Amino acid sequence: MKKRFVSLCLAGLIMVAPASAVFTDISDSRVSQTAAVLDALGIMQGVGGSSFAPGKALTRAQFCKLAVTAMGVTDVSPYASYTIFPDVKHSHWAAPYINAAVRHPELKEKSIIRGYADGSFGPDKIVSYGEVCTMLLRMLGYKEEDVGPFWPADYIAQAQAIGLTDGVTITDARAAVKRGDAAVLLLNALNTDKKGEEGSTLLDKVASSTVKDCILLETGKTHSGLAADAALFYEDGVVDAESPRKTAGTLDSSMIGVYGTIVIGKGSSKVAVGVIPNGNKTETYEVVNAAADRIVTTNGTLRPDRKTKLYISRDHVMNEYENAWANLQSGDTLTLYYNEYGVLQLMAVLPKTTAGAAHSFVYGLATSRRIPAEYTIIKNGAKIDASKLKKYDVVTLDAANRQAIVSDTRLSGKYQTDSTTYSHPSQVEILRQKFSVSSEAAATFKDMKLNDYITLLFDADGNVAAAYPKKDVSAEMQGIVTKIDAEKATVTLTNGLTLRDISIAKDVKTDVMGRLVTVSQSGEGADLIRRTLSGKTAGNWSVAEGKLGSNAVSSKVRVYEEVLSGAPLNAINVSDIDLTSVPASQIKYTVQDNAGTVTNIVLGDVTGESWIYGIGYGKRDKTDEEDGNSPEYVVLRHWDGAKQEESTFRVLTLPRGLGGVPIAVPRGYSTDESIVNTSLDTLKLTLIDTVKPSAFDGSSGVRTKDGYYELAENIGVYVSEQNRFVSLQTAKSNYTSFRVYANKTAENGGKIRVIVAS
């Protein structure tokens, strides 16, 4: 039985002496990582220098050597002094391996490789796909009676059935097997159970031990607190930062995030030399925003259990979600890891590396590289032609997919750094945001001085690609304020960057919370100037076609709703929009990149998801009445999907209609006691009907006198006599009368948002 394994995402830690093997001639990431694992295990090395030659065809002699080594036979000297096949003299470089395959006590019964009918071996003949599949099956203990009489068809079919061919695209039995494909096939075989020996693999021959179900989180390259020969893993449900695991050299940054089995090398050191993925389910999302009960991503809303473990690399700490959700930032790449039973084990924001910077360049300069004519150009998630490229765009060439990925993300501000050499920094700080700088990017700082106003250019992975004086290249920085107090603010820029806890100028007012602002820096603090939502791309938004009028919409478009004029902007998912086409009347504001692609859209109340629904009360703090400055508050009790929550908003003036009635408050208003929401409007919900428990269609909908209404997801029920929310199931089991309230009519997309039981 084949073990759980996915070679498409194959990655490994690298055994090195003293540095990691990095093959610069491999463009396919899965082949690159596979080659690294085999090199670490001493099975398949490069061809010299930093070359692996993935496209070079293998001979029968070369593959025989690989097969013998993968079987754990490293000393072939006893088989070097005689000749078995007439065309493989004892002086032939491969004779010891070919002879060992025939005569070694552990190998001869398997008949891994055989000669031809005329007695020859054909060492220099190109090995075929059918031959490789046959040899791998024999290595695993399969015999003709296990496979079938028809060669090579039966052998290829059996290899496919047990997963040996996962990750390769060869279909012709006679096709040559190139080194890149051979690497994938070999590592598949290493992690496949031997015939009739479940749990026993060839990996046992080349390693001293293994550690299952681990995730590589950090290396010395990404975490300055780690030694060069140490790495941080998620193991047995914990991250032991006090005792990181020893490794063979510095692990390559491209291996971070691998979920699988750590391979412990042989010898006296017993350090981690490789990791093979276990094939368990993983999911990757881009974070839009986070709250205590949800994570809004560009692909949907996640609702993790509050006890789910969350590792955020910039904090180097693992915590439970309820204690760490506030540290998630817009634009974070969040990876979810599930065990073999499909249970979520860990969520992680892994460190960004500068590995891609060497393949990136700034467009439009005399030194710029050429984009190959056959490459597709993708800018901000939309396909464009070369005429829409602009000077100072950052281009990353993706050879594996024949794409040029283009970014126009920029950030301007005062240059700060902890590096001792300002003209060649390893890290840079702007607006209190710290960024690592690769050697290639550092070269562009040669004329920079501390406290200069500069502009950073970023590649599509968020790495600093270059820096220029602000007078030469500037950044238009507009974004939404997601957190603010008297001294600091967090702003999600429309270019995808998040400025976290930036110092703000003293005259910035807290009423910009949730609003669109322009960010600039002219002194020590940042100025946040509120912008009006004026200016938009003309036309309707065809969500399915990805077009707004005649303009392309980015596949990573950031979407917000302003449910009332002047209300905070709330980030939503494209998947939250039920409409196939959003009319122009519901589009309030758009942002385009310099190629005309729409990257940000502000809508009106399209989804109904940008409100907090509950029971609203007005409250005045009488303790301060003596000084004539009595605070007023809107208190909203609501259901978070699992329990009752209570949100309190300090306001200048209480809205009308409060007093224990179903209302909604726009998401994004501040609940900070020190901040007064200068204007806070509420939405009074409409009573649709009073119904019995039998009117409910499970938790999906309810039949009313006005027709069928959907229920909001994870809706709770307010029990008026107890002044608290309970689950819908609990309410239906204990109460007989239900007043159902909606935000709109069903015809206009309304849902039942609040239920009151009695």
Image (cartoon, helix red, strand yellow):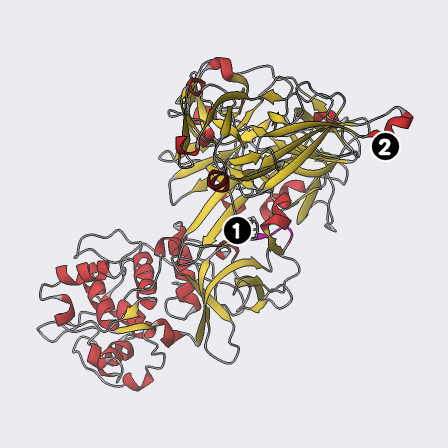
Q: What amino acid is labelled 1 in the image?
A: Met
Mark 1 burial class by Cα count in 10 Å: few <14, some 14-19, many 20+: many
In the shown orientation, is residue 572 left or right of residue 100?
right
Q: Can residue 368 be seen in this view?
A: no
Mark 2 burial class by Cα count in 10 Å: few <14, some 14-19, many 20+: few
In the shown orientation, is residue 100 left or right of residue 454?
left
In the image, residue 165 sits, relative to residue 290, either above or below, namely: below
Q: Can residue 304 be seen in this view?
A: yes
Q: Name the residue under label 1.
A: 347
How far across and down, in percent of the image, does residue 739 sit? 51, 27
Q: Name the residue under label 2.
A: 623
Look at the numbered disc 2 and give the secondary structure of its residue: helix
Task: Locate the N terminus and report the quarter of the image it occupies.
Answer: bottom left
Q: In which quarter of the image is residue 121?
A: bottom left
- The structure residue drawn at horizontal position 22% and vertical position 59%, both measured from the top left corner, is 161
How far across and down, in percent of the image, does residue 617 sit? 68, 28
Query: Could you say which is closer to the camera, residue 461 or residue 177?
Result: 461
